[in-house]
């Protein structure tokens, strides 16, 4: 007996009790495909410890924790709103800190700000 490549049986032998098996079926109900809610907690923690410009990192951390709490409770829409606010605060904090560093470095390079040596 010849088989095509896509029709080769895995075990051509006969199984014991092959004709007497009962087939059980399982029905799985799937929830609608909902994208996961992002709470941006690692980014908020980083901004809180390293780039806390005008306490924006702390406020972003608070909103990230609130978003995670809402996600645990099951309030997807509330978690999405808190996560969106945390994301906006993280973006603002990151941009303001980077701009501050760039301005300070450019002022040091141009000589507007001088570091005095007290030796």
Image: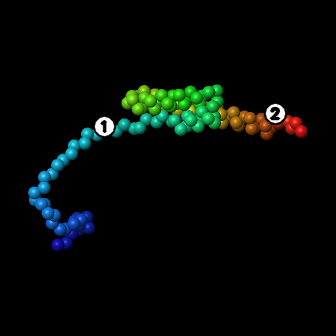
Q: Which residue is mark 1?
A: 31
Residue ID at (12%, 60%): 17
Q: Residue furthest front?
A: 16
The residue most toward the bottom is: 1
Mark 2 → mark 1, Cα distance in angstroms: 61 Å
When asked about the image quadrant of residue 50, the answer is top right
Q: Tell me, yes or no, whether the two marked residues, 2 and 1, touch with CB atoms within 8 Å.
A: no
Residue 88 in sight from this viewpoint: no
Could you tell me residue 12's position as x and y percent?
A: 19, 68
Q: Where's residue 92, x and y in %?
A: 59, 31
* Residue furthest to the left: 20
Quarter of the picture containing the N terminus is: bottom left
Q: Is residue 45 left or right of residue 80?
A: right
Q: Quadrant of residue 26?
A: top left
Q: Count neighbours of disc 1 (C-alpha within 10 A) and say few if under 14, some if 14 to 19, many if 20 or more.
A: few
Residue 45 is labelled as: none
User: Which element carries disc 2, helix, strand or loop?
Assistant: loop
Q: Residue at x 13, y 60 (%)?
A: 18
Q: Is residue 75 left or right of residue 23?
A: right
Q: Earlier in the sequence, mark 2 or mark 1?
A: 1
Residue 64 in picture, x, y percent from top left: 50, 31
Residue 72 at least partly seen? yes
- Horizontally, residue 79 falls left or right of residue 12, namely right
Q: Please, which colouring scheme is shown?
A: rainbow
Reading the image, the residue beneath label 2 is 112
Residue positioned most to the right: 119
Q: Secondary structure at mark 1?
A: loop
Which label lies toward us, 2 or 1?
A: 1
């Amino acid at each position: 007996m010849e088989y095509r490549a896509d029709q080769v049986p895995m075990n051509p032998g006969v199984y014991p009790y092959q004709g007497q098996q009962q087939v059980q079926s399982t029905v799985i109900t799937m929830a609608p495909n909902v994208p996961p809610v992002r709470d941006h907690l690692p980014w908020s923690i980083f901004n809180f410890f390293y780039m806390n410009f005008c306490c924006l990192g702390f406020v972003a951390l608070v909103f990230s924790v609130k978003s995670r709490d809402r996600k645990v409770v099951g309030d997807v829409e509330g978690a999405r709103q808190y996560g969106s606010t945390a994301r906006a605060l993280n973006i603002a904090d990151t941009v303001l800190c980077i701009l501050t560093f760039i301005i300070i470095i450019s002022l040091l390079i141009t000589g507007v700000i001088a570091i005095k040596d007290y030796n």
